[in-house]
Amino acid sequence: MAEYKAVRVEAGRGGWGGPLTIKPTAERPLVYSVTGGGIHPVAQRIADLTGGEAFDGFKSSAPFDKIAVAVIDCGGTARVGVYPMKKVPTVDVHATSPAGPLAMFIQEDIFVSGVGPDNVKEV
Amino acid sequence: MSPPPWTRYATTVTVVGEQVAELVDQGILIWFAEGAPEELHFFTVLHRPTVTTGGVRPGDLVRIDDRAFRVTAVGDVANDNMVNLGHMDLKANGDTEPPLPGDICLEKLPLPEPRPGTTLVIEGEAYEAVS
């Protein structure tokens, strides 16, 4: 049985929202990277610190109820809203603020942006 | 004489999400290459690109079938998203300052509703040597 630890994810420079506390569980083990170029360093750091499983959303699909956190490199319109809409805590590596057709779902308690690896801290 | 246009991106639509029509009414078209996670499909135009050079910039032309839209602004991460993920946020709002980093803003004209088989080509002048 895996032991999971919590991390605190804060908004980086110019970012918005958060901080979020992320702790995977046996039911929700996945650190889901929906980013260009494979697992993003922010997703890898969250996985390394928490014991969660880094997962590349562009390589294969994951059931939503397995996702502990989604890490995105969204430019502000599409992905920023989809994961909060599904109640999945969402970390954008770009410094975006609520916008786009799903802006109403982007709330501080489920979304944080402008995040670099240094904004992910052990609790 | 101006040089011939340079193709920055070319692709063909394969699947159109059920909420794309609503976004078209708002002047927005969200694109992802095939292989994008399923949760993004409902508002996305999925496509299969053949040219993914990138480098789109203001003044380029976005051709969707027989319609052409001049690019008015390009956000800081738009080209990376386009090249890496086939992801574009096309917004026909005429903005010259991109409001969001992922935006490719187009002149303010009604957007067509893509169908499977619809083609998108982005073309511009070849770059001059960058100093």
Image (cartoon, coloured by chain):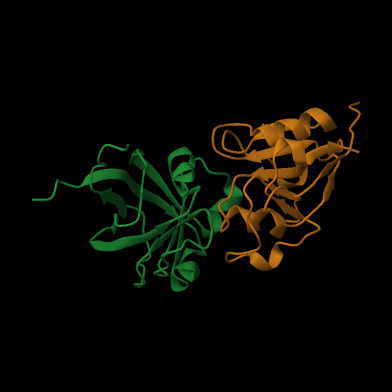
Q: Residue at x 38, y 42 (%)?
A: B48
Q: At which x and y percent is residue A43?
A: 70, 35
Quarter residue B90 falls in: bottom left
The quadrant in which residue A77 appears is bottom right
Q: Quadrant of the C terminus of chain B?
A: top left
Give the green chain's letter. B
Image point (35%, 51%), residue name: B57
In the rendered image of this protein, does residue B117 appear above or below residue A36?
Answer: below
Against A101, residue B35 (above or below) is above
In this picture, residue B117 sits left or right of residue B37: left
Q: Position of residue A55 (x, y in %)?
A: 68, 33
Residue B78 visible from this viewpoint:
yes
Picture mark count: 0
| Identity of the residue furthest to the left in this view | B1
User: Does residue B56 appear to the left or right of A9 in the view shown?
Assistant: left
Please give the name of the residue rendered at 38% of the width and 65% of the height, measured from the top-left corner. Answer: B113
Q: Nearer the viewer, residue B108 or B63?
A: B108
Q: Residue at x 33, y 46 (%)?
A: B11
Could one spot residue B34 in this view of the protein? no
Chain appearing in orange on the rendered image: A
Q: Position of residue A22 (x, y in %)?
A: 83, 43
